[in-house]
Image (spheres, helix red, strand yellow):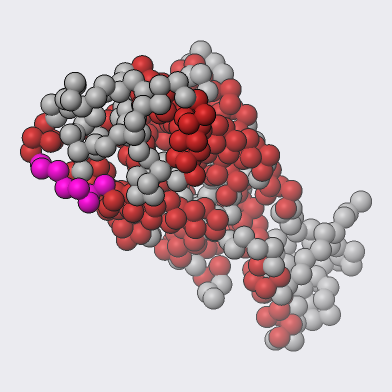
Amino acid sequence: MKRVAAWSAEDVSDWLSKEGMPEYIDALHQTDGPALLRLTEADFQMPPLSLVSSDAGQQLLEKAETLRIETHIEAHKNGHANGHAGGLPNGTSKPLRNGTTGVKNSGNEMVHIHIPTMEASRSSFPAEWGKTGLAFIYAVVCFVTTTIVISVVHERVPSKEHTPPLPDKFFDLFDRIAWAFSICEINGMLLVVLWLIQWILLKHRSIVGRRFFFIVGTLYLYRCITMYITTLPVPGMHFQCSPKLLGNWEAQMRRIMKMIAGGGLSITGAHTMCGDYLYSGHTVMLTLTYLFIKEYSPKRFWWYHWVCWLLSAVGIFCILLAHDHYTVDVVVAYFITTRLFWWYHTMANKQSLKETSQSNPFSRVWWYRLFQYFEENVSGTVPRNYQLPLSWRALHWNRSVKYSRLDIQ
């Protein structure tokens, strides 16, 4: 591997991308290896670094300090290989063959190298699995509530003979294709599996997980409200809705449990109820999984992003092609999903938006207190870092160099 002192500006950019800090690439596009090692906290108090750093450069400075340690050790090893000790990292003097610095009264001089602690790293992006568990429970409760509301709304859906489907421009342009909805659900399951694998490999999976659970739970909670207050007739005459149970709560509970067990999918035979049209839950999952996949994967994986976008776009188009949702159901679902995702991440990435104030209109949304609870200890943009979820990874992949802390009185 090329020594850091010999890095060009392109090498620094590649290193920033590899370490999950692509936001600094533009600001440091003229910075070479030696300049990278000279960065200090003061540099992050002034533009352009102050404009892109949300944690005062703490993460980058810690990694740069690690590079300085490695550079010093490499120089020290090379010095011994040549029969003399290497230079001191601070450049104060040149050590002689016997290991002294050649400076009078310097026999007791010691070099103190700051080693970033694991506690400092955790303080920027703490795991806080308890909060993630709470967000998961919130998502489950919202999903179950949605299923119950679907069962209630199903009893209110007018029969297709009495109230025919509403006119829809997309239905006028495209004839129904029966198998299209199966393609939609297959694409959705593929995206969920891809996102699950990617999430497991994320270093900060706890933070990202609770963001996903909170957003998807809130979207399904909104869906409960919209489909309950406005019950639309079936979008097509091909619908075969389950018979109404007319107050038989025991049968309704069995139907709800069957739908939950089948994941709410028609392809599993679990979803036979009608009325859950405004807005489309399938569109929510197709859109949200793609947004999370793209947000938390490296930009250089453009081909992966395009594949996932294609799966999402084709799945949404197939919803309409199957005439299983009105076009307005899909449009509203896409709009609400993308806006909630972008709003939440904008708030999470800007420290000023985590504080309640008159100048922060985001603090007036009903879920702001819950957002503050989930994000209060997260400092800055979560890096796109990956690692194996197994604890033995560190035993096999760590460098052989061992560091110890030197306490100086």
Name the residue nearer the viewer: 269 or 1: 269
Taking the image as shown, residue 206 lies to the left or right of residue 315, namely right
Taking the image as shown, residue 67 lies to the left or right of residue 50, namely right
Instruction: Tell me if residue 402 can be seen.
Output: yes
User: Measured along the vertical axis of the image, is residue 31 above or below residue 338?
Assistant: below
User: Whole-percent x and y of residue 269?
Assistant: 37, 46
Q: Which residue lies furthest to the left in this view?
A: 173
Name the residue nearer the viewer: 359 or 199: 199
Taking the image as shown, residue 68 lies to the left or right of residue 152, namely right
- Quarter of the figure that contains the N terminus: bottom right
Name the residue nearer the viewer: 173 or 89: 173
Residue 82 image-quadrant placement: bottom right
Which residue is painted at 82% across and 67% down in the image?
103
Instruction: Tell me if residue 20 can be seen.
Output: no
Answer whether residue 385 is magenta in the image: no
Which residue is painted at 11% across and 31% down in the image?
169
User: Whole-percent x and y of residue 387?
Assistant: 58, 61
Q: Main secondary structure of the magenta part?
A: loop
User: Measured along the vertical axis of the image, is residue 157 above or below residue 110?
Assistant: above
Residue 398 image-quadrant placement: bottom right
The magenta span reads 174-181
